[in-house]
Amino acid sequence: MIAGSEQLGSRRVGRSKFTLLGVGVLATGLVLGSAGVAAAAPVSGANSAVDTEWEASWAAYQFEASQAASLLVTKNVDLPITINAPIDRVFTAYSNFNNSFGRHPFLKGVLDRRKYTEGGAEVWEFIALEDIPLGPISIPGRTVGKQRMYAAEHWYSTETWDLPGVITRQKITFAKDGDSTVVTEHLSFSAPAVLIDYTVQNGVDAHIVNQKAVKRDIENGML
């Protein structure tokens, strides 16, 4: 199912381009390390350390996004799921980030940075705290993100970035299907060539687990 839904936009990455990416990642890592990132606690609430980390990470994301065609490999995946509930109820539950706690296999916490309105969207800037599987172990990850919510139109988007140069863009759409709702996650993963297959597989697996858990708990009335 996954292989059939991927539209691949792969590009070869030369040694000099890997070097440039590595320099950008290293510089960002030094900035984040000096801000005390590793010691931050997995609780909500914006503060100066969160602002510093978010801004440094977002600058790295913008640089890498601008160079994606030459530095990174991109793969796209669509994940549709039908939930037996009305669209307004599904959208409210599905778009609530907090409902992924205990359902998304990586997500362990979130640091709020700020919320505001821009261009008709409710925008939320955050840092997600994750335990990312790496073979038999897991490593702590800190993923900087921005969500844009268009509640009246029943869709939202999320952009996230984390070391070492992994970009994930999501557009989640909601459509009525009789008394049910079809939710489609349009996912775009960008990463260095040596990481792209691992990134896509881990990301897709995690999203499917979360989708199925949210579907189950909307349909059984927990959400």
Image (cartoon, helix red, strand yellow):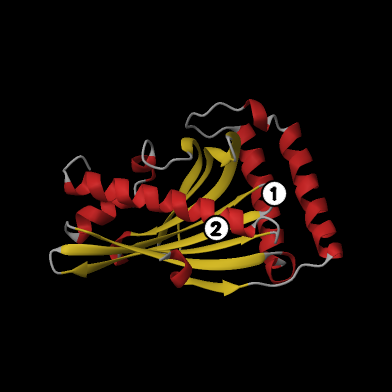
CB under 8 Å between discs 2 and 1: no
User: What crowding class fits label 1: few (fewer than 14 Cα within 10 Å), some (14-19), or many (20 or more)?
Assistant: some
Is residue 122 depicted above or below 131 in this figure? Answer: below
Indicate left or right for 25 with 98 as reference.
right
Q: Secondary structure at mark 2?
A: helix
Q: Residue at x 48, y 40 (%)?
A: 106
Is residue 177 depicted above or below 156 in this figure? Answer: below
Q: Say whether residue 116 is visible.
A: no
Q: Nearer the viewer, residue 45 or 141?
A: 141
Q: Residue at x 37, y 42 (%)?
A: 100
* Percent x, y of residue 203: 51, 53
- What residue is pinned by disc 1? 164
Q: Say whether residue 23 is visible.
A: yes
Going from the N terminus, do you reach mark 2 or mark 1 first? Answer: 1
Query: Which residue sits furthest left?
Result: 179
Q: Residue at x 52, y 44 (%)?
A: 126
Q: Nearer the viewer, residue 24 or 117?
A: 24
Q: Amino acid at mark 1?
A: Pro
- What residue is pinned by disc 2? 200
User: Where is residue 131, by image quadrant?
Assistant: top right
* In this rendering, the label closer to the viewer, 2 or 1: 2
Q: Secondary structure at mark 1?
A: loop
Query: Which residue sits furthest right?
Result: 16
Marks 2/1: CA distance?
14 Å
Indicate left or right for 43 with 21 as reference.
left
Image quarter where the N terminus lies is bottom left
